Amino acid sequence: MQNTLGKRIKFLREEKEISQLEFSKILNINNSTLSQYEAGNRMPGDEIKKKIAEYFNVSLDYLMGASNVKNPYKDKEEQNLVPEEFVNSAEARAYVNKHQIFVSGGFDSDKLDDNEILEFANALLEQMKMVSYKYKK
């Protein structure tokens, strides 16, 4: 029996720092049942799968291993949210790291201090505004 589902349940549960016992109570199932799901020895029914997906805000496709995108709708919304200006260095760093061109070129945003990453991300925003204005039709 393929265990993608079990691995994903365990990963999501541990990511949220929830014990098996705590999560089994949330699902209203026995702890041993959850343990069997995670080990791949038992398959949850559709209602339980739906409950798990809703709890972790992931798609059923992700949960079942048919997709590696946790929540395609949420991810699309997040990609479209770009501030006018970055004021938070953590958000700026995350935004820069999303752009593969920087990461694959050996650029390491962790080497920049908070002020530098803010300057870099805001300069990026300005460049994108200028380029999009130039090619606006």
Image (tube, helix red, strand yellow):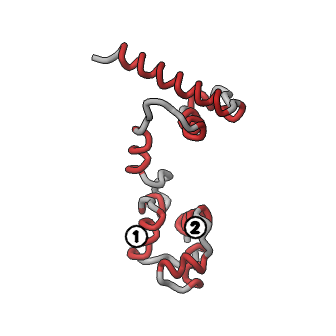
Q: Amino acid at mark 1?
A: Lys
Above/below status of 43 relative to 76? below
Name the amino acid type tagged 2. Answer: Arg
Q: Nearer the viewer, residue 56 or 5?
A: 56
Q: Residues within 10 Å of mark 1 (few under 14, many from 20)?
A: some
Task: Check the image and report above or below for 125 versus 91.
Answer: above
What residue did someone put label 1 on? 50
What is the CA distance from the residue labelled 2 to the residue labelled 1?
15 Å
- Identify the residue at image location x=52%, y=81%: 25
Quadrant of the drawing holding the N terminus: bottom right
> Which quadrant of the rendered structure holds the C terminus?
top left
- Asked whether 37 or 101 is in front, the reply is 101
Say which mark, if any, is on residue 96: none
- The quadrant where residue 59 appears: bottom left
Name which of mark 2 and mark 1 comes first in the sequence.
Answer: 2
Q: Secondary structure at mark 2?
A: helix
Mark 2 residue crowding within 10 angstroms, few (<14) / some (14–19) / many (20+): some
Residue highlighted by disc 2? 13
How far from the left and from the top, in percent, is residue 78? 43, 44
Q: Is residue 83 left or right of residue 23?
A: left
Residue 61 on image: x %, y %: 43, 59
Vertical position of residue 4 compared to residue 29: above or below: above
Residue drawn at (39%, 44%) of the image: 77
Q: At 39% across and 74% down in the image, what residue appears?
A: 46
- Quarter-of-image position of residue 10: bottom right
SS at badge 1:
helix
Q: Position of residue 47 (x, y in %)?
A: 39, 76
Q: Residue furthest left?
A: 137
Name the residue furthest top.
Answer: 134
Which residue appears at 41% of the width and 50% of the height?
A: 74
Vertical order, 42 against 11 (above or below): below
